[in-house]
Amino acid sequence: EAGVAQSPRYKIIEKRQSVAFWCNPISGHATLYWYQQILGQGPKLLIQFQNNGVVDDSQLPKDRFSAERLKGVDSTLKIQPAKLEDSAVYLCASSFPRGSLYEQYFGPGTRLTVT
Amino acid sequence: QKEVEQNSGPLSVPEGAIASLNCTYSDRVSQSFFWYRQYSGKSPELIMSIYSNGDKEDGRFTAQLNKASQYVSLLIRDSQPSDSATYLCAVSLRGRDDKIIFGKGTRLHILP
């Protein structure tokens, strides 16, 4: 079974520029998550999709971040304009319920550096 | 009180010994608990999940859950240098099985 795919793996941009990340979840996984992980911290949830609907975006900085999940499969996360504090690893994860247990599986991440 | 707390370490354990990693959580209605391993520069990898009180064993790994004490731990037997990584504890949040919150992780260093 193929894992969660993400691209690009690395991105360097200047502040105030825009950037987009792409994620393809594990086949059949209806729930998709975007996390931000700053060095030395655990992943922080930015947005959660169930199929193509948003379940939770309470921690998404909506003035600069946006995300969509077209047709309930692939997803993109965009930052516009970027700030220095957005430098982090952006992780995509997907899950499928086994009973009440949702085990999340992560992609390789995109390391963003904002200069 | 932070929702998921872990000692940041580093925790140094001799090769072959038992490594014990601990995690406490604040939400009494949490139902699902996870341990992820994260190597430097890599993404988190799920190694154990548990939702019933008691022990769950998988190879050299044992997860222990005590809901009354709001405590979950991970034991690694016969520690190997390849176990050196950051271990992230994650807990389902406020009765929502599909959403989890992570601790900051414990850095584990296995001494050859």
Image (cartoon, rainbow, N blue to C red):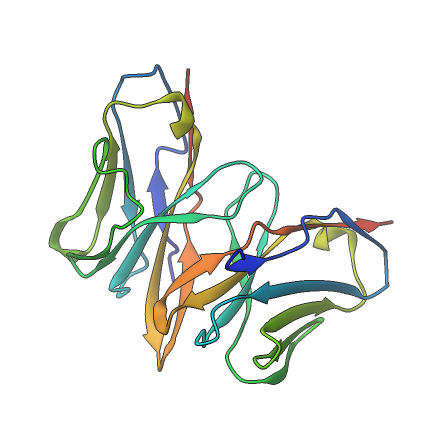
Is B20 positioned to the left or the right of A18 in the image? Answer: right
- Residue B70, compared with residue B20, is above or below; it is below
State how many labels appear: 0
Q: Quadrant of residue B29?
A: bottom left
Outermost residue, left direction?
A71
Q: Position of residue B9 (x, y in %)?
A: 73, 48
Please state which of residues B105 and A75 is positioned toward the viewer in this rendering.
Answer: B105
Residue at the outermost front position = B1
Q: In what quadrant of the picture does the N terminus of chain B appear?
A: bottom right
User: x%, y% of residue A55?
Assistant: 22, 59
Camera-nearest residue between B73 and A75: B73
Q: Is residue B20 left or right of residue A46?
A: right
Quick one: A113 or B102, which is closer to the camera?
A: B102
Q: Where does residue B64 sit, x and y in percent of width and height? A: 65, 77
Say which quarter of the image contains residue A64. Answer: top left
Question: Which residue occupies 18% across, 61% down?
Answer: A51
